[in-house]
Amino acid sequence: MNIRDYIKSGFEAYYDRHSKVGEDGFCVWMRPGVPAPMKANDSQEEWSVWKLVPSTVTAEDISALEKEFGLTFPEWYKAFISTYHHYFDDIPEQDTNEPLKNIRDMYNPLLCRLGYLPFTWDAEYGCIWCIDVGSGPDEDQQAIYEIDHDILFGLDEVHTDRKQLQEHLVLLYPSFKAYFDHHFVEKG
């Protein structure tokens, strides 16, 4: 299976499922301030429907981000952040101006030091979702966990170890692919 093609197909299917414009003239993909290359039409209105635009994120950009985070990103995640520019609500937005800004903002020193790659928030923005890249190189074994971000304030960034952190993690998915399938491929 080609991971990038799989991500591309999942993003496109998810976008298409929610792109209907309602009787009120709005759709899920409308927002203010859409950069011109991402506008689905030539509308000069403040609110515009955005479209998926092929990503300009390079392997070098991802390598630099891995160095900043101190982690090696899974191939699934690399494809996830470098396939399309988008404004999906449930993952960090990636516009054409600064496509990695919101991903960079997910950085958490404690999680990264202990091998957990933070990649999104839950729907209420109270819990951080992260990939356990510290469990080894087999991506099928790199589970997705969530942790209440308030708990992180009470943990010592220098002395907390993986075992102590794991006491606060909640297992969500067995792998990034399982997460992606649930949120983008299967979600109605």
Image: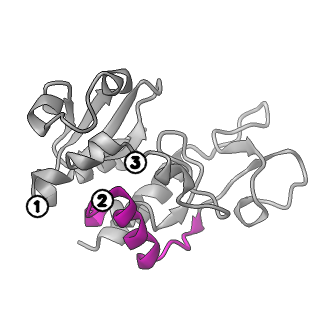
Residue 69 lies in the magenta-colored region: yes
Asked whether the viewer can see residue 130, the reply is: no
Residue 70's disc is 2
The kind of residue tagged 3 is Phe
Q: Nearer the viewer, mark 2 or mark 1?
A: 2
Q: Quadrant of residue 2?
A: bottom left
- The residue at 36%/34% (across/down) is 128
- Along the polypeptide, which appears first: circle 3 or circle 2? 2
- The residue at 27%/59% (across/down) is 71
Residue 184's disc is 3
- The residue at 33%/59% (across/down) is 77
- Along the polypeptide, which appears first: circle 3 or circle 1? 1
Q: Nearer the viewer, mark 3 or mark 1?
A: 1
Q: Nearer the viewer, residue 157 or 123?
A: 157
Magenta stretch in the rendered image: 53-76
Asked whether the viewer can see residue 93, the reply is: yes
Q: Are marks 3 and 1 in contact (CB under 8 Å)?
A: no
Few, some or many C-alpha atoms within 10 Å of disc 1 (few <14, some 14-19, many ≥20)?
few
Q: Nearer the viewer, residue 102 or 109?
A: 109
Q: Give the position of the C terminus as an image quadrant.
A: top left
Few, some or many C-alpha atoms within 10 Å of disc 2 (few <14, some 14-19, many ≥20)?
some
